[in-house]
Amino acid sequence: MKLIGPFAQIITMDKLPLKGSINDNMLHIIYDGGIIIDNEKIEALGSYDELYTQAKNNKAIIEHIEGQQIVLPGFIDAHTHICWAGSRINDYAQRLEGKTYVEIAKQGGGIWSTVHSTREADLITLEEITARHANQMLRDGITTIEVKSGYGLTVNDELKMLRAINNAKTKAQLIPTCLAAHICPKDFNGSANEYLNMLVEKLLPQVKTEKLAKRIDIFVDDAAFGIDEARTYLQKARGLGFDLLVHGDQFSTGGGKLAVENEALSADHLEVSDEETIQDLARSNTVAVALPGASIGLGLPFAPARKLLNAGACVAIASDWNPGSAPMGHLLAQASIIGAYEKLNIAETLAAITARAAMALKLNHCGILKIGYTADIAAFSTNDYREIIYRQGKLSPSAVWKRGIRIEI
C-alpha cells in the first residue's frame, strides 16, 4: 500500500454522464488531495491530510509529490495503428502538392505502401516498433492504447502483426484489434467478398484460438468495402464471438449507420456523417470516435463532434496514429485542436480521452479515478487542470503511474 500526493487538484472524471454534453462545473475535483493505491488499484482518494494519517497508521509507503501538481486518469487512445514498418513521407509530400489520398493510393501509395513494408518486417522488428511507439505515448500520459492490425492483409501477416502487438514490451496496456478488413489487397486472387469470406474461414478462427484479439474492425468506404459486404462480414464475425468496430464516414457515408445497425462498440472517423447518422448514433450505445489527426494530416474537416454531443451521443477522441493519414500521433494536441474548432469545452475534451474513450474499448476499470479502478494516473505541473487543454499539448506530464507504478519518463 502507498499514498501519493499531495496534489493541488485531483480531476476524477467520476460521476459524469457518458453521453451528451458536459459542463465544466460538473467535474468532480478534490483539492489538496491524495490517492492511496493497493494491489494496482485505487484504495482511497480524498483529503491528503486525512489519507496521510490513514497511511501512517497502516505503515504504507508515502510517495511525496513536490510542488503544485494536478492529476487525471491516465489517458486512453481508443484508435491507433502503431504497429507498422516503413514510411509514408512521399504520400505526405504529394498531398501537400495537391494530390488526394485516393489518388495517391491508386498510384501505389497509401495503405498498400505500408503493407509492403510491414510484410517484409519480421516479428521481432514489429514488436520493437510497436513498443517504441507505445512507450512514447506512455510518456505523453496515455496508459491504455488500442492497436490495430491491417497492414498485413494475408492470414500469416495479419497473425504476425497481432502477435507483435501482444508481445510488445511496454508497460502501457495494449488492446489489439484485428483490422484485416482494411482494404482488399491488390494481390488477392478474388473479389472483395471472397477476401472477407477467407478472413472469416481462415484468419478469425486462428485469432480466436490464439486469443490475439477480441475485436474486429472494417473500413467501409468506396475505396475499401461496401455496405453490404461489410454487413455480412460484421455479422459473421459477431457469430464467432468478436466485438465489432467500423471505420466509417471518412470519405463517403453509410459506415456510421452500419455501425449503429450492428451495435458496434464504436464508429470511428465520421468526418462526413450526415444529420440522420448523427441522430442514429445519439440514440444508440455506439461510441462516436473522432480522429482529428486524420483531418489534420489530410487537410479535411473534423468530425462533427459538437453536433454529436448536442444530439446526445457519446464522443471519444483518438489519435489514429498511423504512417499515412495521421502521422502526428499526439493525442493531447489533437484533442485540444478539435476542441477549439468544434467548440468542445474542457470537460468534454478530457472526458473524450478518458472515461468516454474507455467506453469505446469496453473497459470498466480505467478512465476514472475511483475506488476499485486501476491506478492509471497522469500528473501535470500546474495548479489548474484547464491549463492542460489551454496549452494544446505543449504541457507534458510530469509523472505517469501505470497500475500504481511510477513510470520513468
Image (cartoon, rainbow, N blue to C red):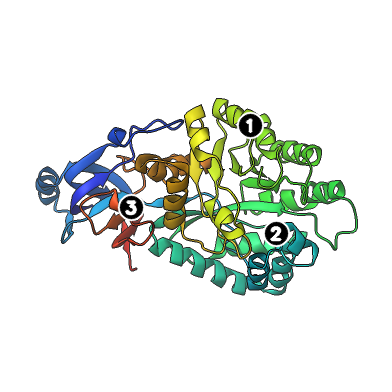
Say if mark 1 contacts mark 3, CB within 8 Å. Answer: no
Residue highlighted by disc 3: 390
Work out whether mark 3 precedes mark 2 in sequence or the reverse, and give the earlier one: 2
Where residue 371 appears, x then y in whole percent? Answer: 29, 39
- Badge number at residue 101: 2
Taking the image as shown, residue 16 lies to the left or right of residue 68, namely right
For the point 47% across and 48% down, the residue is 338
Residue type for callout 2: Tyr
Marks 1 and 3, the one that precedes in the sequence = 1
Separation of marks 1 and 3 at Cα, in angstroms: 31 Å
Q: Tell me, yes or no, if residue 63 can be seen here.
A: yes
First in sequence, mark 2 or 1: give its number. Answer: 2
In the rendered view, does 54 fall on the left or right side of 355? left
For the residue labelled by badge 2, is the local secondary structure a helix, a strand or a loop?
A: helix
Q: In this view, does 307 lie to the left or right of 403?
A: right
Say few, some or many: other residues with alpha carbon within 10 Å of mark 2 (under 14 / 14 to 19 / 20 or more): some
Residue at x 38% of width, y 45% of height: 350
Query: For numbered disc 3, what is the local secondary structure?
Result: helix
In the image, 98 versus 247, the foreground residue is 98
Query: Crowding near pointer 3: few (<14 within 10 Å), some, many (20+)?
Result: some
The kind of residue tagged 1 is Thr
CB under 8 Å between callouts 3 and 2? no
Residue at 68 percent across and 52 percent down: it is 179
Query: Which of the image's four quarters has the C terminus?
Result: bottom left
Q: Say which mark, if any, is on residue 264.
A: none
**Residue at numbered disc 1:** 277
* Residue sitting at x 30%, y 42%: 12
| Residue mark closest to the camera, 1 vs 3 | 3
Q: Where is residue 400 shown, x and y percent of the image?
A: 33, 59
